[in-house]
Image (spheres, rainbow, N blue to C red):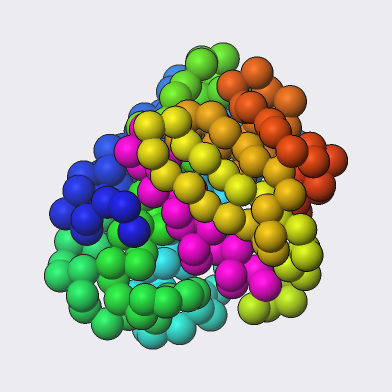
Amino acid sequence: MTIPPPDLRIHLAREVRAMVALARRADDEDAWDAPVPSCPGWSLRDLVAHVGGIERWVLHALAHGDGDAPAPRVPDDAGLAAWLAGSAQALLEALAVDPATPAWTMAPPRTVGFWIRRQAHEHAIHAWDAAVALGDAPSLDAGLAADGIEEVVGTLWPRQLRLGRVVAPDLGLALVADGGGTWLLGGEAATTLAGDAEALALALWHRIPADDPRLRWSGDVTVGRSVLALPLAP
């Protein structure tokens, strides 16, 4: 983890509130049918329903100690923004405790701190999605983006491997962030992908293409692109 829990909590609050504001804007602009280019097949309606569902799932996990939350009942368009705002506020309140508090989580550490971090990134990437769908040119916070790379490589990718959702490639992909930070996906690095932390994080989440001009490749690019295309996160 590259950001301490108190600072992650600040990021969490900002990104959760940004997502709610974008949902309210979608409602004001009657944009629920707008496609989300970074989530093919989804509309803004689908995206907000997903985020609200995730928030309710985490709230269930914190309250009940398991990941078996029932499917949420999603309201119609007229109530969708308020529905998201309600679960967003409840999530912030539920996570306003000592990060070391034990909690059910989808991966280690088994503490509330896991969810503070995970939901900061969940909301950051989906707020980015929503802003793009509304015609904006959003950016990710550089520090949070760097921690997001660390989360994918150190937490989400190992979970994908553990669950058998992907097989680790023999030849790997090295990631190098401008200004500091290196990571490895897979086995011995056959290629290197460099760029600023935001571009690398967006590439890992498949939000920008492998040939985006913000990314710089060296080595066996074919191998590197095949690694990048894997389901690195759920």
- Residue 190 x %, y %: 74, 49
Q: From the viewer's perspective, is 106 left or right of 112? A: right
Q: Nearer the viewer, residue 166 or 35?
A: 166
In this rendering, the answer to whether 10 lies above or below 196 is below
Q: Nearer the viewer, residue 151 or 119?
A: 151
- Which of the 4 image quarters holds residue 99? bottom left
Q: Nearer the viewer, residue 82 or 47?
A: 47
Residue found at x 57% / y 33%: 194
Residue found at x 44% / y 63%: 56
- Residue 9 visible in image: no
Residue found at x 51% / y 15%: 136
- Which of the 4 image quarters holds residue 36? top right
**Magenta segment: does it hold 102?**
no
In this rendering, the answer to whether 226 lies above or below 132 is below
- Residue 22 x %, y %: 43, 29
- Residue 168 visible in image: yes
In this rendering, the answer to whether 148 lies above or below 208 is below
Pick the quarter of the image with the N terminus: bottom left
- Residue 203 x %, y %: 62, 37
**Magenta segment: does it hold 145?**
yes
In this rendering, the answer to whether 51 lies above or below 91 is above
The stretch of residues the image draws in magenta is 142-161
Q: From the viewer's perspective, is 156 left or right of 57? A: right
- Residue 15 x %, y %: 34, 39
Q: What type of secondary structure mainly makes up the magenta span?
A: helix
Count of picture labels: 0
Pick the quarter of the image with the C terminus: bottom right
Residue found at x 56% / y 15%: 135
Residue extending farthest to the right is: 222
- Which of the 4 image quarters holds residue 73? bottom right
Q: Nearer the viewer, residue 135 or 25?
A: 135
